[in-house]
């Protein structure tokens, strides 16, 4: 989970739970406050209510005692009882009892005094002026009692007792507590409503912040939070806006750097591969995947052993991770066309704590270098061999002539003729080597003159006509319907075409024929040379353009070939941006084709053109019925190349 995702999740949780947290918090505060107030204030109010009731009892006792003192002093019990009953009607819930000094009940608002026992031993009578709570057997309930003495002239006449049911007192106290609770609940309801309102007002900016973070996380970097308050949430919104501006700048810089590095890695010919300390692939550019012949879907989190099975790379990774030192190895990777030869350099990378973080591999493709080294070695060996053979022969013949002054003339002439042939062969080899060196040196710097390919073919055919007639080979040229224009170096192109014609004539049997076709299509300008020679085996067709490579070495030397002609052809064609190919089948002859880029039509070629060589459209110049011009329908012959242009054997 990214930092933005974690921040978003956290803000969402805050925003979603904030209202409930405020609501529950307020509920708890109000409930605790209500309970505490109920216990403290309710008790205080109840005590005050009790004190108020007791004060009323005292007041009632004092007022009533004053009203009854005269009747008590006169001894008029009937009047006393009448007064007590009258007062009882006004006092309602309070009970009045008049008790004589000896404890006899004289009057009572609730009972018949004659039925009541003496009260001399009652606690309130014994201790007047105090409140007593006890169970009344007369009324069968808990009562609160208060008594005051009735005196006249300093003489105690009896006592007046005022009683009140504890149930009535409890109801009064409960009424007070109930009223308080009702008020507290109303306050709780109002408080919760206000809490929800304020919580939503506070949560709304948090939801805005949540939406903002989600939008930024999805790439909407232009979005900002509207700051509507100047409190902590406003400061938070401002800080998030500033943070977003900084993140956008950093993200753009990082994206640019990543893009540049990705472009650099993608453009590199060298492979770059990085694995972490657990040998998981962290990075692999396209070149590394290609060089290792790996599956492109593997890099990224997979193990190195899944990317390549090359033991050298796995050993380099383990060695670097273990020793922390650079290492290098050269290895062969199997693949098409013999695979690749790679030079692998592994370098350790440490983190800030000095611990091994990863290993970076750099892969260099040495396949072409090693191939060129082999070509160079083979070329030196072949040149040495090709030069040594005629030199050895010439030296032997000359030593024989020098050592035998009496040698017969016929023999001497024969030996000197062999020396002359060897000299001519050395001249041919040296001439071809010089021509090849010149072409390679000028490759990419050939002249780009407007030329007609069919004119070049006609000149080369005329040049080799005498050689063809001498070998009894019919040389046939097929002219295209319209001229085929190219841009190139006339001398180099003539050399290439001449070498193909020379080889075709040399390898065609007596009575055979060599076809020369020029044509053009959307792909370019074509010239094809076909013969009736012995053909070239499939496995040798890829090598016939190598220097000094011959399919039939003995026959090639017998025909005067140097083994360099086709190499010259290939270098000339490649230097003109074209390509050369061969089609051949053993016993059915060969066809060599050269394709060159066409020149613009305003340089002489009319619109249109003909199909590439091999199609009989437009064939001419001595072709016979049934002659397909392809040398028996197949291509290629022994790769023994003829001499280069200007050499006697090529004319």
Image: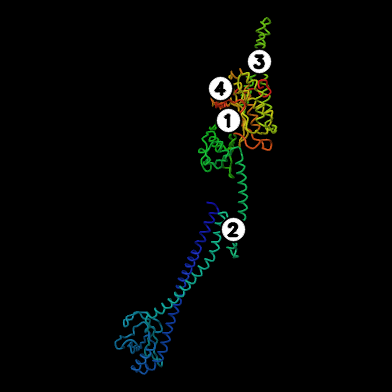
Disc 2 is placed on an element classified as loop
For residue 26, say whether it is visible. yes
Q: Is residue 562 found left or right of 11 in the rendered image? A: right
Which callout, 3 or 2, points to the residue nearer the camera? Answer: 3
Residue under pointer 2: 223
Instruction: Give the quadrant of the C terminus.
Output: top right
The location of residue 565, given as percent across then percent down, is 63, 24
First in sequence: mark 3 or mark 2? 2
First in sequence: mark 2 or mark 4? 2
Q: Which mark is residue 534?
A: 4
Q: Which of 275/52 is in front?
A: 275
Give the CA separation, mark 1 to mark 4. Answer: 23 Å
Which callout, 2 or 1, points to the residue nearer the camera? Answer: 1
Disc 4 is placed on an element classified as loop
- When the figure is inspected, residue 349 is found, relative to residue 616, above or below; the finding is below
Residue in the image at 49% along x and 70% along y = 193
Q: Is residue 303 found left or right of 259 in the rendered image? A: left
Proximity of marks 3 and 1: CB atoms separated by less than 8 Å: no
Residue under pointer 1: 616
Proximity of marks 3 and 4: CB atoms separated by less than 8 Å: no
């Amino acid at each position: 989970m990214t930092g933005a995702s974690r921040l978003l999740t956290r803000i969402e949780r805050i925003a979603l739970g904030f209202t409930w947290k405020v609501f529950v918090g307020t509920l708890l505060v109000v409930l605790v406050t209500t309970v505490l107030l109920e216990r403290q204030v309710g008790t205080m109010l109840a005590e005050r209510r009790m004190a108020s009731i007791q004060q009323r009892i005292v007041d009632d006792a004092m007022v009533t005692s004053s009203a009854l003192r005269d009747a008590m002093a006169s001894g008029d019990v009937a009047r006393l009882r009448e007064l007590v009953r009258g007062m009882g009607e006004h006092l309602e819930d309070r009970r009045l009892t008049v008790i004589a000094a000896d404890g006899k009940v004289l009057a009572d608002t609730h009972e018949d005094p004659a039925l009541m026992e003496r009260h001399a031993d009652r606690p309130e009578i014994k201790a007047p002026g105090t409140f007593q709570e006890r169970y009344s057997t007369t009324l069968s309930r808990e009562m609160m009692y208060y008594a005051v003495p009735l005196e006249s002239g300093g003489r105690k006449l009896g006592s007046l007792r005022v009683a009140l049911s504890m149930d009535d007192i409890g109801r009064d106290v409960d009424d007070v507590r109930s009223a308080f609770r009702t008020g507290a609940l109303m306050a709780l309801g109002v408080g919760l409503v206000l809490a929800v309102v304020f919580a939503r007002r506070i949560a709304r900016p948090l939801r805005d912040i949540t939406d903002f973070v989600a939008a930024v996380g999805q790439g909407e970097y232009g979005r900002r939070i509207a700051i509507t308050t100047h409190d902590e949430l406003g400061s938070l919104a401002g800080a998030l806006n500033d943070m977003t501006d900084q993140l956008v700048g950093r993200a753009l810089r990082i994206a640019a750097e990543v893009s540049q590095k990705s472009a650099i890695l993608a453009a590199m010919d060298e492979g770059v591969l990085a694995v972490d300390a657990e040998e998981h692939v962290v990075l692999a550019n396209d070149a590394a995947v290609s060089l290792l012949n790996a599956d492109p879907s593997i890099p990224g989190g997979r193990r190195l052993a899944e990317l390549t099975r090359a033991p050298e790379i796995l050993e380099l990774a383990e060695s670097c991770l273990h020793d922390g030192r650079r290492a290098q190895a050269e290895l062969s990777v199997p693949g098409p066309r013999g695979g690749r030869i790679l030079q692998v350099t592994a370098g350790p990378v440490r983190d800030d704590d000095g611990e091994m973080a990863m290993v970076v591999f750099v892969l260099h493709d040495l396949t072409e270098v090693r191939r060129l080294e082999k070509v160079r070695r083979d070329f030196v060996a072949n040149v040495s061999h090709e030069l040594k053979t005629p030199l050895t022969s010439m030296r032997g013949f000359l030593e024989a002539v020098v050592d035998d002054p009496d040698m017969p003339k016929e023999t001497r002439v024969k030996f000197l003729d062999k020396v002359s042939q060897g000299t001519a062969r050395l001249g041919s080899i040296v001439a071809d080597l010089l021509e090849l060196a010149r072409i390679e040196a000028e490759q990419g710097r050939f002249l780009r003159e407007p030329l007609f390919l069919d004119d070049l073919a006609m000149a080369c055919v005329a040049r080799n006509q005498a050689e063809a007639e001498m070998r009894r080979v019919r040389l046939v040229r097929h002219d295209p319907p319209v001229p085929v224009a190219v841009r190139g170096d006339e001398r180099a192109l003539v050399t290439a075409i001449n070498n193909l014609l020379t080889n075709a004539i040399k390898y065609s049997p007596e009575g055979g024929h060599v076809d020369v076709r020029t044509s053009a299509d959307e792909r370019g300008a074509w010239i094809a040379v076909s013969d009736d020679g012995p053909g070239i085996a499939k496995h040798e067709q890829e090598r016939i353009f190598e220097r000094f490579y011959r399919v039939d070495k003995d026959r090639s030397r017998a025909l005067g070939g140097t083994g360099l002609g086709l190499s010259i052809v290939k270098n000339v064609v490649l230097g003109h941006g074209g390509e050369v190919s061969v089609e051949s089948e053993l016993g059915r002859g060969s066809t060599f084709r050269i394709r060159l880029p066409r020149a613009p039509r305003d340089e002489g070629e009319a619109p249109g053109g003909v199909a590439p060589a091999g199609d009989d459209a437009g064939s001419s110049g001595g072709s016979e019925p049934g002659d397909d011009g392809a040398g028996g329908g197949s291509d290629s012959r022994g790769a023994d190349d003829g001499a280069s242009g200007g050499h006697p054997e090529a004319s």
